[in-house]
């Protein structure tokens, strides 16, 4: 496992992030968003598995792009805890990255007993979701969305389909009204794009507090009610933090996974020029995207308790270590051959903080794609792939829009 020692006692192969005075890689650029895989190859050539980076200008971190190195870190919470409280003391309050990364009383940002308490409540609230009923929920939400543009012959699948579908699914799972849910989605988008992040967190928190008070008084069969009445006895602040995690995992990443998978299916002949003629399934496409272009490309932050030597590189104490799921999944050390059906990617994370809701995500995304392609089997991209614009930001792999065209067709009937 990783060694903990005093800096200066061992040779360093790729330089030390502790003493790194040279340029750091910045991910929040249009150039990185346009071609991240080229950037990962260049990073690997220059730095190896551990890359000195800036999350935003002035906020240093280390980006992990080696698959095996990432697994070691993700499975070693003792040396790499998820608690950022010491780190955030030196980050200015107006930093756009701080609201997204700072400590909150939830499973994502805690270790040890606190993590266990939050994780148990969070997982129990998710495990009780009726997956059979969720199929019907996706269909009930997808069909009206498809009907809203099916007669037009064109659509943007980000703003008109994937985003509204993803956030309405989460609204229903947490027992949230459309009005409160809209404020949640707006605040969450500001957080992920690190634009007006402080405003986004305030907007998000205020909306969720309304939901919590409602479900404490009027419990139902939903995630919020189950959290509110779990034996962990979460207070309102803890409840807000759990729900932020749920919305954070449910809106932006699912939206991106739907659209990134659709892009693959519309542009790769293995899935058929008319989609239905392809030899591979939606699930195959979904797994391939989770390998190549995972919707949450760089995340899973941890903060070493003390300087630590890993891969012959010193990592500073209390400085973020960020796992690049996209970079690690495309590590040449583990890639090769046909990986259809291979689900050893890190898109869901690994270790004690691995995503507890991946079965739900698989179901929602696959059903959303199948509903669309069944309704519009002749759908095609409206522009060449090189004209698609990818949103800038250190965390997500997300298109600004996915314009498509198709033969006009009458509305679908509800089942």
Image (cartoon, helix red, strand yellow):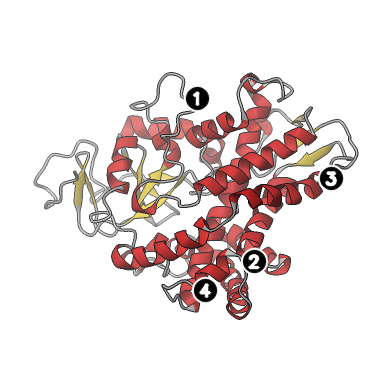
- The answer to the question of whether label 2 and label 3 lie on touching residues, with beta carbons closer than 8 A, is no
Give the answer, above or below, for where 3 lies relative to 344.
below
- The answer to the question of whether label 1 and label 3 lie on touching residues, with beta carbons closer than 8 A, is no
**Among the two numbered marks 2 and 4 on one chain, the one whose residue lies closer to the N terminus:** 2
Mark identifier at residue 228: 4
**How far, Cα to Cα, is label 2 from label 3?**
25 Å
Secondary element type, mark 1: loop
- Left or right position of 87 against 309: right
Q: Which residue is mark 3?
A: 147
- The answer to the question of whether label 1 and label 4 lie on touching residues, with beta carbons closer than 8 A, is no
Secondary element type, mark 2: loop
Q: Nearer the viewer, mark 1 or mark 4?
A: 4
Say whether residue 90 is visible.
no
Mark identifier at residue 340: 1
What percent of the width, then of the height, locates residue 375? Answer: 79, 35
Q: Report the label total.
A: 4
């Amino acid at each position: 496992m990783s060694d903990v020692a005093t800096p200066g006692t061992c040779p360093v192969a790729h330089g030390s992030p502790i003493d790194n005075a040279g340029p750091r890689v910045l991910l929040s650029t249009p150039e990185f968003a346009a071609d991240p895989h080229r950037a990962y190859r260049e990073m690997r050539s220059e730095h190896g598995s551990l890359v000195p980076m800036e999350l935003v200008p002035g906020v240093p971190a280390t980006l992990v792009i080696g698959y095996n190195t990432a697994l070691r870190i993700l499975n070693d919470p003792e040396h790499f805890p998820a608690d950022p409280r010491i780190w955030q003391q030196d980050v200015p309050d107006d930093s756009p990255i701080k609201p997204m990364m700072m400590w909150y009383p939830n499973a994502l940002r805690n270790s040890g007993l606190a993590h266990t308490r939050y994780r148990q409540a969070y997982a129990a609230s998710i495990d009780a979701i009726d997956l059979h009923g969720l199929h019907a929920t996706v269909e009930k939400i997808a069909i009206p969305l498809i009907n809203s543009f099916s007669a037009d012959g064109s659509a943007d699948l980000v703003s008109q389909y994937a985003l509204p579908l993803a956030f309405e699914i989460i609204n229903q799972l947490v027992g949230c009204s459309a009005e409160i849910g809209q404020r949640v989605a707006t605040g969450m988008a500001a957080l992920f794009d690190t634009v007006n992040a402080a405003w986004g967190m305030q907007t998000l928190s205020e909306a969720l507090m309304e939901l919590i008070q409602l479900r404490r008084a009027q419990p139902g069969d939903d995630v919020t009610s189950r959290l509110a009445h779990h034996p962990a006895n979460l207070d309102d602040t803890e409840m807000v933090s759990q729900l932020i995690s749920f919305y954070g995992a449910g809106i932006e990443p699912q939206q991106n996974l739907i659209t990134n998978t659709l892009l693959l299916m519309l542009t790769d002949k293995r899935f058929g020029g008319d989609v239905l003629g392809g030899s591979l399934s939606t699930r195959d496409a979904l797994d391939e995207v989770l390998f190549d272009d995972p919707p949450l490309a760089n995340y899973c932050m941890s903060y070493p308790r003390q300087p630590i030597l890993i891969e012959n590189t010193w990592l500073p104490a209390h400085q973020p270590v960020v796992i690049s799921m996209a970079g690690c999944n495309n590590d040449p050390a583990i890639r090769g051959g046909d990986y259809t059906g291979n689900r050893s990617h890190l898109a869901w994370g690994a270790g004690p903080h691995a995503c507890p809701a991946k079965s739900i995500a698989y179901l929602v995304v696959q059903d959303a794609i199948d509903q669309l392609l069944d309704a519009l089997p002749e759908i095609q991209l409206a522009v060449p792939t090189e004209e698609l614009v990818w949103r800038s930001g250190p965390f997500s792999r997300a298109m600004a829009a996915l314009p498509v065209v198709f033969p006009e067709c009458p509305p679908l009937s509800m089942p």
